[in-house]
Amino acid sequence: MARLFSKLKAIDFFKKIPSDLTEATLTGAWLSIVAAVLMMFLFVAELTAFLSTSTSSQLVVDRSPQNELLKLNFNISFPALSCEFATVDVSDSLGTKRMNLTKTVRKVPITLDLERHGAAVEDTAHKMGPKYDEEGRFDEEPDIDITVPLSHANFEATLGRYPIVVINFYAPWCHWCQRLEPTWEASTKEVHDKYPEWDGRIRFAKVDCTAEVDLCRQHFIQGFPSIRVFRKGHDDIYIGGMHEHEAYMGDRTKEALVAFADSLVPSAGQPHRKLAGLSAAPKTPGCNLAGFVMVKKVPGTVHFVARSEGHSFDHTWMNMTHMIHSFHVGTRPSPRKYQQLKRLHPAGLTADWADKLHDQMFVSEHTQSTHEHYLQVVLTTIAPRHSRHTGNYDAYEYTAHSHSYQSDSIPSARFTYDLSPIQILVQETGKPWYQFLTTSCAIIGGVFTVAGILDALLYQSFKVVKKMNLGKQG
């Protein structure tokens, strides 16, 4: 056994020198201190590098799952577009067209100063167009015409003379107004026959908005025909403590209009009573639209426009001035994800990093102005170091180019989006533990070896110099 151990000693890499054969020097002591400090500094620097992470960015083809939908979020105020007619449409390059989205869109009436004025408006005017009499014709004698359009000269006097006045605001060029005209005249005749002048409880009247432009704008008429109910000189009603306009939204048939008139007569002076066909038109001229739409990841357009199945619009009256409070793509990150994005994003995050149109106002300086916003959307995916547990973070950014132009079609606000096929992938990486261990050993061994060689050189140099001095003295 002793012989075996003695043979093992022969392969010892670290043979020892007896202590009585070693010599300590002051130069070696200083070199040892410097080497120890240098080793400690390099070790701490390597440990810091090991604990920290680095990021690498690369451009790859978009790896989003097939048929994945994209969420477009918006909050936009139109001070001159009534909630009664405001709609949100979506179309894309695949031919998909979705008109008047309501499930994820909320409409709130606002004033010209963009201040909220009332509760959210239920979109009932666009759900189903009004019914008409067949071909819109009646067998009444065509020479009977007891209705004369009101003007600004006799409008207020008419409202003051009758407790209830139902007024049809129309435009002669409007297809829907032309279709309603014979029905309205027949209904007017029957109502006036049933409630003659001496009765004085109700009157049907009409206003030509092409002749009385200021009068129609004064009552916030944007679509034709608009049938308003005036009680004791005004059409104001209160819903939830808010002012609205009292309007008729029922079927446009003689039977429905006459039945509506019958229901109004007993309720003179009682505007809160629920009547068939009675609805509330926003009192304020503007509308705030907020919500989101889900779209396919192909080029498309979100379209804000005035539309109604039973109304026509004078394009020269439409003003699509709007304030974009926010328009962002995708889901807003949680505070934790936002901090990760802020730390790892290759360009850093600015205040408007995901919402370039935030709080921007676009004014229609000319009539029939359409506003176009072109958005180029890019997906940045952040892959943190521990993404297996937390998952990747997707951040959508866009560049925006906006302009307005005059068009023969109805003015609108269009947000055209185009997604880049290239995705920016940012990966967070760190040093493996074995690399840290290898580097640490190299630091310690390298500094120790270099210091030892330098100490040996200095020791031999001093020894030679000492011998030379002794030789000169001898």
Image: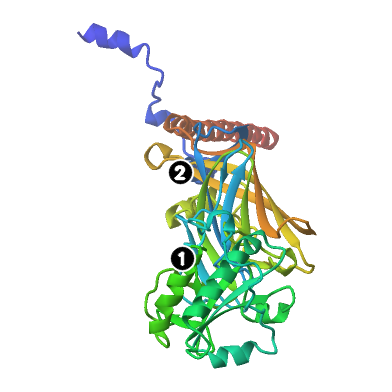
Neighbour tally class for label 2: few under 14, some 14-19, many 20 plus, Cα within 10 Å: few
Neighbour tally class for label 1: few under 14, some 14-19, many 20 plus, Cα within 10 Å: some
Q: Residue at x 42, y 88 (%)?
A: 269
Q: Residue at x 62, y 66 (%)?
A: 181
Question: On screen, 372 above or below 219?
Answer: above
For the view shown, which residue lies furthest in the left direction?
1
Question: On screen, 27 above or below 160?
Answer: above
Horizontal side, residue 8 vs residue 467: left or right? left
Q: Nearer the viewer, residue 143 or 288?
A: 143
Using the numbered discs, state the Cα–Cα distance from disc 2 to disc 1 in whole angstroms.
82 Å
Percent of width and height locating residue 462 = 62, 36
Q: Residue at x 61, y 65 (%)?
A: 182
Percent of width and height locating residue 399 = 68, 51
Which residue position holds label 1? Answer: 255
The number of callouts visible is 2
Name the image colouring.
rainbow
**Helix, strand or loop under label 1:** helix
Mark yes or no: residue 33 visible. no
Q: Residue at x 44, y 32 (%)?
A: 437
Task: Mark 2 or mark 1: name the one nearer the start of the chain.
Answer: 2
Question: On screen, 370 above or below 185?
Answer: above
Dot in front, 2 or 1? 1
Q: Amino acid at mark 1?
A: Glu
Mark yes or no: residue 420 visible. yes
Quadrant of the rendering where the N terminus is positioned = top left
Q: Nearer the viewer, residue 37 or 9?
A: 37
Q: Amino acid at mark 2?
A: Leu
Q: Nearer the viewer, residue 327 or 285?
A: 285
Percent of width and height locating residue 127 = 48, 56
Which residue position holds label 2? Answer: 51
